[in-house]
Image (cartoon, rainbow, N blue to C red):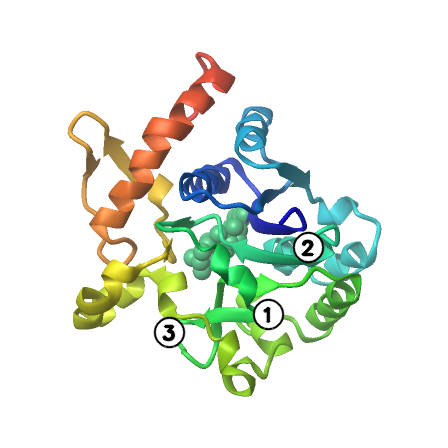
Amino acid sequence: MADQAFVTLATNDSYAKGAMVLGESLRNHKTTKKLVALIGPHVTEPSRAVLNKIYDEVRVVDVLDSGDTAHLVMMKRPDLGVTFTKLHCWALTQYSKCVFMDADTMVVSNVDELFDREELSAAPDPGWPDCFNSGVFVFRPSDETYNKLLRFCAEHGSFDGGDQGVLNSFFSDWATADITKHLPFIYNLSSVAIYTYTPAFKQYGGNAKVVHFLGKTKPWGYTFDPKQRRIRGDVQEASAHPSFLLEWWTIYSSLVVPMLQQEYGDQPFL
Ligand code: UDP
Ligand code: MN
């Protein structure tokens, strides 16, 4: 449906690489939804050009420039920069329903069925399962919700300093109100869980639909040897499962790098 979209966010060129792989993974698995990338003003021209090839819409969100509630709120809470930018997805009101996905996620199967869910649907956070993880969530763009969220954010801040804290406080009945808003964990499988509960990963990991490279080291932080098809150096256990990381790098090196090379010419971008 034309009025439904997957939405991601990248405020810089590093996260833009993640967004490129995410977009390609959605295309590879033949999504019928629109793809929207929100980008910050610091994303450079060549990265924007590549995002434009993959995404149906690339929209620059400059919270500091916007002159609306977001700007006023931001002046009070400059610490919440990226968080405010993420909340901007509620302003995409030309879409009736969207699925937000962090730029460090990748789909390993078609997940269009997520659009059957209602706002706010999300999977439990592996660190505190009564909170949802805000790396993947179903929402309905709405100016009203957007402004309420911004005001809420300005008044209460975020208990974890990021968007996940704000969103969990705002959608505070998620844990108890409606089980249909609990996405199965396979829609936001973070590698943390792979190592904290290995038998469950062995039992259910094969059904994974969305992989989330949550944590400090992101896939683009590693280096990859394309000839040997191997990640160079130590793969830090907590941050990534080797086979998912390899899948990320396969998409990056085979589909994204050629586009980046075309845009950057001889300039280095890695
Ligand atoms: N993000 C961004 N620029 C940043 C940090 C975060 O664009 O400097 C966006 C990006 O979409 C990212 C999301 O915000 O995936 C959440 O941050 P991150 O994935 O790093 O947090 P984690 O999932 O590891 O808690
Ligand atoms: Mn993330």
Q: Which residue is mark 2?
A: 88
* Residue 10 drawn above or below residue 239: above
| Marks 1 and 3 close (CB-CB < 8 Å) | no
Q: Quadrant of residue 100?
A: bottom right
- Mark 1 C-beta closer than 8 Å to ligand 2: no
SS for callout 2: helix
| Comparing labels 1 and 3, the label whose residue is closer to the camera | 1
> Would you name the residue on which mark 3 appears?
127
| Residue on which the image places disc 1 | 118
x 59%, y 81%: residue? 172
Distance from disc 1 to disc 2, alpha carbons, whole Å, reads 19 Å
Amino acid type assigned to the residue bearing label 1 in the image? Glu
Which numbered mark, 1 or 2, is in the foreground of this view?
Answer: 1
Residue 91 lies left or right of residue 258; in this view the side is right
Image mark count: 3
- In the displayed structure, 137 sits above or below 241; it is below
Judge whether 200 appears above or below 45 on screen.
below
The quadrant in which the C terminus is found is: top left
Q: Residues within 10 Å of mark 2 (few under 14, many from 20)?
A: many
Kind of residue at badge 2: His
* Foreground pick, 163 / 132: 132
